[in-house]
Image (spheres, helix red, strand yellow):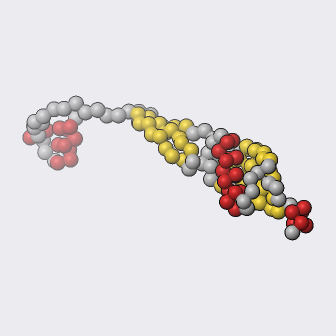
Amino acid sequence: MLKNTLSGKLGLPESNITIHERKKVYMPTKAEAELKVGANRARAVVDLNINEVWLEVSELPDEYFLRTVTEILMEKIGEEPLESKIERNNGKVKVFGKTKRFNFEFKFNGYTGAVVYGESIITDEASESL
């Protein structure tokens, strides 16, 4: 097969091509890779026999989003959440709730953990007390 390919590319007859050393060559048929997807990990499988690619990734757990919201709120307004709720819908995660003086809402990509939207609004009671 090698001699045939070389003779076609070089324009020489196969009889003029000599192979001096023969070695077995391993041709992979499947490749697997672990990928970093934002704050998450994914597994990709490539099957070279049928030219297919599969990607296995699961959504991040609720604890990740609760921890991230707590970190954001402590950094931005200096308060921890008193109550929080999580809603999931088609790969999007919405975390909303209250702190001592604010109502908050954050939306995340459920797979990467990226913040898509974030808002904290002071409550009427806290505004009046100021």
Q: Is residue 30 above or below residue 99?
A: above
Residue at left offset 57%, top offset 48%: 39
Residue that lies at the very extreme toward the top in this rendered image: 24
Residue 46 visible within the image: no
Image quadrant assignment for residue 14:
top left
In percent of width and height, residue 88 lies at 73, 43
Question: Which of 10/72 is in front?
Answer: 72
Q: Is residue 89 above or below residue 20?
A: below
Q: How many marks?
A: 0
Vertical arrangement, residue 56 with respect to residue 10, above or below: above
Image coordinates of residue 12 in percent, x first then y, are 13, 45
Residue at image position (75%, 57%) is 79
Out of 120 and 74, give the one closest to the viewer.
Answer: 74
Within the image, what quadrant is residue 47 found in?
Answer: top left
x and y, in percent, of residue 56 in the image:
55, 37
Q: Judge left or right: residue 121 versus residue 75.
A: right
User: Is 130 in front, or is 3?
Assistant: 130
Residue 117, compared with residue 86, is above or below; it is: below
Query: Quarter-wise, where is residue 51 in the image?
Result: top left
Q: Quadrant of the C terminus?
A: bottom right
The reply, left or right, for residue 74 in relation to residue 26 is right
Residue 121: x and y in percent read 80, 62
Quadrant holding the N terminus: top left
Q: In the picture provided, is 31 more to the left or to the right than 82? A: left
Looking at this view, is 85 or 17 the one in front? 85
Q: Is residue 70 visible in this depiction of the protein?
A: yes
What residue do we see at 22% from left, 30% from top?
24
